[in-house]
Image (tube, helix red, strand yellow):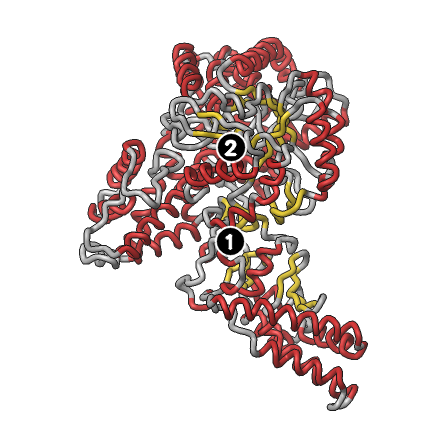
Amino acid sequence: MNGVRIPVASYRLQFHRQFGFEQARAIVDYLQRLGITDVYASPTLKSRSGSMHGYDVTDHSRVNPELGGEEAFEQFSDALREHNLGLIVDVVPNHMEIDDDANRWWQDVLENGASSVYAKFFDIDWRPPKRDLRNRVLLPVLGDQFGKILENGEITLSYANGGFFVNYYAHRFPVDPRTATELLDTVAEHVRFALGPEDESLIELESIVTSLRHLPDRTTTDPDELAERQREKQVAKRRLARLAEDSAVVRRSIEGVLVEWSGRQGEPESFDRLEKLLREQVYRLSHWRVAVDEINYRRFFDINDLAAIRVEDPHVFSAVHEVVLRLISEGRVTGLRIDHPDGLYDPESYFLTLQNEARRVLPAGGGSAKLPITGLDCVIYIAVEKILGEHESLPMNWAVHGTTGYEMLNLINGLFVHGESRDTLLQFYEQIYGQRVDFDDLVYQCKRIILKVSMSSEMHVLARQLDRLSEQHRWSRDFTMWSLHEALREVIACFPVYRTYIQQDTSEVTDEDRRQVETAVRIARRRNPATDRSVFDFIQSVLLLQEPEELSDEQSRARRDFVMKFQQLTGPVMAKGLEDTTFYRVYPLASLNEVGGEPGSYSVPLADFHKRNMVRCARWPYGMSATSTHDTKRSEDARAWMNVLSEIPQQWIERIERWQQWNGGKKVQVDGVSVPDANEEYLLYQTLVGTWPLEQATDVQFLEYVERISQYMQKALREAKLHTSWVNPDSDYENAVDRFVRAILSRDSDNPFVGDFNELRHWLDLPGMINALGQALLKMTVPGVPDFYQGSELWSFNLV
């Protein structure tokens, strides 16, 4: 493709504080000698302090100073140029880290509410049903109930640079300046007592208070009033900062009043003023465990600290891509990796805009190239982190070069699983599991759990939106809010793919999208025979843009907006329900439980492998071919070793039965139940197969390994959400599993398990190595760009 740099081989670098641009520059020569043509970098913009991945961006206008900042980045970039290596950077257009006061956009929203210039940057529902949350944002950050936290004195007030703040441990929230007048009145009383009523400091302070009282309300969206509020509050802050700096009395008065207003433990009434002040803020602080249903800002998946941003707005798009477009114009960035495109409001429009903006900033005559089949004109290489289901394909109307390669990862991995062992391993596993494994039903049930627990707030917002749509027409106005909520939840739980890609400005629905919607509604109807069919018919008509002729343009736009928001939700629900719940509950062969994997799938026949490669060669020949990423559940080598088990099912089963007998006595009783259960024990044995040290470990090294396995099992247990979870951890159960792990991995002479397992693992080493080398060879030769995760050129047995 003349004019667009297409990588021949990419190498993923995972940046963090201990591995920044300087360290990356030191290995550029090594990467070139390895045969790498393009470095593929994790996010490089300013992120949360101490971030190990960079996906928690706090400032889109700055290169991350923890990685070395702009200067170190340029030196790294210069080294790449000298070695003729390109640079693909990871762009995070969906969300931002908000649990950090370095995010000035979010801080401005918390100070100014709907009148903030950044209010439209975030997807906030300013009119939720609960009256106390109208024109406010619920922040689930407290470790306990609000009243307990308040009267414990854990919430305090502070002052800095003309502004007041609410503090809760590491959290700092700005106080709406207009609500600080009562506090400043108290400060004025102290100053009046100390200096008298005619003192110039007091007069200036009272003038500042008057100006704050006259600020436009934070709910205004009138452009003139918004500008006035922004201007006048800054003026008032500067005046107060100057006054506090010039007058020691004012400064001491502020400090004293803040202590007084922060309350005294053991005197509940002393917290009344602070509680009143908190009620007047844009935000409402709440207990993180119990407030999840009422969160009224859209999140990245179910992570409270990551707020979704509205990159479909041109102003937001410009702000988010400011630095990356500059680096493209300077020739320092030659390709882009786009994180989670399924979270975008309109992916097709986003990618076209991105290519057009890149065309705008690149030097004239830089050239472009058309994509195969579609003929879309591209000026820069783009790979997208799109997870494709077994019967899902990348939309051909996207101006991108392919995915980051999860579908290729699973295709190659399945080739190394021996298909003839499926029935034997599955039958044995179902004995352990205690029942027949119905993968489809399990995914459905897990998605329902996600919608009920983890993402209930997004579900409620969407259902309210649908309820408003039902009021548009006489044929749908009788549906209750509850019936719509339940039917909508069922449709999402039954959705067969991550999402559809219906666009807002079209009346056409592709055959593929229509098929997915109709399939979801049909299955939802079948699973809910007691629910009136007309409710599902209404939802289907809305999703397929089948609108009554009488609708106004405004009503039609409201329906289209619902469809777009619906599509943004189905992807995260699928990912959380499948990858982060189902795959931690059932695992006949755990190496198949991978990102992009299909529940119930087993091996890949050779003929299917060739067929799918031919399709990829024709449609997406420049997509990435990955076998390990920062998100994979297991590294490629761990999967390669585990896949060997499919070649020796009988020997494996005999070992498992022997180990169950040996280790049964090491289990602990928790509430009358042996822990871990047989299913969790089976996951542990498979995990050991994939991670056991390749070389003889010292006692210290082995203890570190045991610790690592214990931590993994805790994560696996919480993700499964059966006996413990991230929201409600059961320490007794988790500690029992931890003791079991440490007991069976003891190197004491009276423990036969370690020696027996070590014997099996050494026997697996040769076929495991052959598998690993085989998949590396395939990755380098199938259609696409072979991508190597940092360190994967060596033996690597990592877990998520």
Q: Mark 1 points at which residue?
A: 121
| Residue 559 vertical position relative to residue 35 in the rendered view, above or below | below
- Count of numbered badges drawn on the protein: 2
Q: In which quarter of the image is the C terminus?
A: top right
Residue name at image x 75 percent, y 85 percent? 200
Residue name at image x 60 percent, y 35 percent? 328
Task: Give left or right: position of 544 versus 757.
Answer: left
Q: Where is residue 409 in the image (x, y as percent from the top left)?
A: 50, 22
The type of residue carrying mark 2 is: Asp
The extreme front residue here reads 365
Task: Give left or right: position of 477 versus 561.
Answer: left
Q: Distance between the residues labelled 1 and 2?
A: 47 Å
Mark 1 and mark 2 lie on one chain; the one further toward the N terminus is 1
Q: Position of residue 363 (x, y in %)?
A: 58, 34
As helix, strand or loop, the secondary structure at mark 2 comes to loop
Q: Mark 2 points at which residue?
A: 677
The type of residue carrying mark 1 is: Phe
Q: Where is residue 626 in the image (x, y as percent from the top left)?
A: 54, 23
Task: Give left or right: position of 185 versus 657.
Answer: right
In which quadrant of the rendered view does residue 85 lie? top right
As helix, strand or loop, the secondary structure at mark 1 comes to helix
Q: Dot 1: within a 10 Å radius of its alpha carbon, few (fewer than 14), some, or many (20 or more) residues?
A: many
Q: Dot 2: within a 10 Å radius of its alpha carbon, few (fewer than 14), some, or many (20 or more) residues?
A: some
